[in-house]
Amino acid sequence: MSTEAAPPNHAVSDDAFKANFSRNLARLREAAGLNRAQFARLIGVDKMRITRLESGEHAPGGALLLKIAAALNTTAEALAAEPVAEAAAEGEAKPARSKRRG
């Protein structure tokens, strides 16, 4: 019989991740002054994808999560974290502007 304790499970459930992510995404996008269509164009997806992400219907894959984090000048970890107080987060996100083509 082993006396070693099992390491703590720090994994967040899928449901908790979706709930945290959806609230954080909406809050940070709005703080950046972007509507869903503008943000969708910025990261190269359609507006419906943003709607589904913000409603918690879908979770982003790894590459999209990183793209969203970069566009909102935050980290993937912060997007997945339990939401912070709304008042403390105001003005925290400023969108990363894509390079102009042409």
Image (cartoon, grey):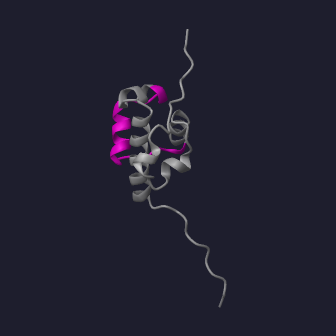
Residue 38 image point, x, y percent: 40, 26
On screen, residue 96 above or below 66: above
Q: Judge left or right: residue 76 versus residue 28.
A: right
- The range drawn in magenta is 42-62
What residue is shown at x 45% (from left), y 61% (from top)? 13
Looking at the image, which residue is at 38% across and 36% down? 50
Q: Picture coordinates of residue 20 (x, y %)? A: 42, 53
Q: Is residue 46 above or below residue 17?
A: above
Whole-percent x and y of residue 71?
A: 52, 33
Q: Residue furthest top?
A: 102
Outermost residue, bottom side:
1
State how many labels appear: 0
* Residue at the extreme front of the image, as rendered: 87
Q: Nearer the viewer, residue 34 or 1?
A: 34
Q: Quadrant of residue 3?
A: bottom right
Observer-nearest residue: 62 or 38? 38
The one nearer the camera, 33 or 3, is: 33
Q: Quadrant of the N terminus?
A: bottom right
Look at 54% across and 29% down and name the residue there. Answer: 96
Residue 23 % position (x, y): 39, 48
Q: Is residue 61 left or right of residue 18?
A: right
In the depicted view, which residue is nearer to us: 24 or 17? Answer: 24
Q: Is residue 67 magenta?
A: no
In the rendered image, the quadrant that contains the C terminus is top right
Quadrant location of residue 28?
top left
